Image (cartoon, rainbow, N blue to C red):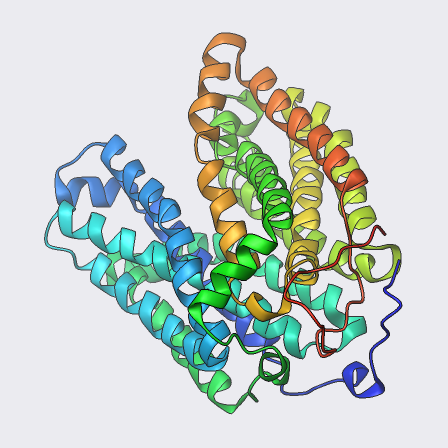
Amino acid sequence: MHLTDEPTSATLSPNADTPGWQYVLGWILDAFDLFVVVFLLTELMSRFHVGKEAMVWSLTITLAMRPVGAMLFGSLSDKFGRKKPLIACVVYFPSITILSGFAPNYLFFLTMRALYGIGMGGYWGIGASYAMDSAPLRKRGFLSGMMQGGYPFGYPLAAIGMQTIAPRFAWQAMFVVGSIVAAVIVLITLKAPKSETWKLHRMPSVRFMFTTLLKNGKAFAYILLLMTVMTCLSHGTGDLYPDFLKTIPDVVRGFVLRMKASYGIPVLYSVGAILGAVAFGSLSERIGRRYAIMGALLMCILSIPARAFGQRLIVLVLGSFFMQTGVQGAFGVIPAHLNELSPDVIRGLFPGFVYQLGVLVASPVLPVQNLLRQHFGSPWALASFEFAPIIFLMLIFALGPEQRGRNFRAQHTGAEATYVHG
């Protein structure tokens, strides 16, 4: 259901300078830099003379620092505009990535990964609000899917880089190559217009920011719950699955996309994730944000038996492909949905901060899933961490609010967001 507050024709007109495309590139870069560490665990363990547990901790601290970055850069974007903080963030996190690659010891590397988490957390909130500010209204869902689809695109790019760049220039080059993309993003952003929407709703003071957060406590709690369960689904379906595939005889013996199946299947379901994000993001403009997400979640439920209990290669390929199509299809709606549910005056801060805080709250998901695997086996551990979050999310979205079609350029009398059901 669209709001009765219809946008003007100017709002609906396409804007060639919309900043959505550099945001897509930036989210790809964010993911690429994160997955590089995953692919280089063995090399980094050897360089710093530490075990796998220490390297996994470096990934954990990166995720833990994301809410700090969302708060810092988000509040700056609400106070000073989207453009300059976005450029500062884009310059910041690739610089930290380069320092990570040439760290002299583990402590320095761990510190750099913590600082990198600040940049990673800051980028999503600013970029999403900047893009949603300027996106033509009827293309908001499509751009939302494009942006969120950038994250799974970082995985196959990192995998390709490990097979092409690392062998030729040494593995340290993987920490440097992203700076080229960062430079492109900065150049595009410099030419992009300032956010007219931000000018209408500029945050007057830091005190006003905290007052607005308090006034929107119910919305904050709702979105935090939503993003916590969404993160449980995302990490519960993705992080341990490659290890599970290595236990299946057909996968060990088989090939997908002319590479070992244990590598080919993740690349293939990453493609499904990208397609799902764009498809369901676009669909949300027709049927609503909540219904589009629920449709994507239904696809996830239907794929559980093949993905978790399949033993034949083709069954696992199809199950994992449609699972990730559904998971990232649901996530593809999130940038638009969260921005539409956020109060205008702190829309640079609010959606990004709650998003990243949900990631932090859901961080124990992997130890819990690993514990279930030890007691009940991998198939049942995977299935339980897929089915339970999906059912919970169905209830959350069935009962939750929606503001599809909200006009960000309309003046509102209060700082508190008003929600309607779709």
Q: Is residue 401 left or right of residue 53?
A: right
At a point 72% along the width and 37% down the height, the residue shown is 396
Asked if 28 appears above or below 374 in the picture, the reply is below
Front residue (pair 68, 255): 68
Residue 128 image offset from top left, x and y in percent: 58, 66
Front residue (pair 121, 342): 342
The reply to whether residue 133 is visible in this rendering is: yes
Residue 228 image offset from top left, x and y in percent: 56, 39
Quadrant where the image shows the N terminus: bottom right
Res 195 → quadrant: bottom right
Q: Is residue 113 left or right of residue 396?
A: left
The reply to whether residue 39 is visible in this rendering is: no
At a point 60% along the width and 39% down the height, the residue shown is 225
Residue 126 image offset from top left, x and y in percent: 51, 68
Q: Is residue 10 left or right of residue 215?
A: right
At a point 55% along the width and 47% down the height, the residue shown is 267
At a point 49% along the width and 16% down the height, the residue shown is 373
Front residue (pair 332, 102): 332
Tally the marks.
Answer: 0
Residue 6 image offset from top left, x and y in percent: 86, 74
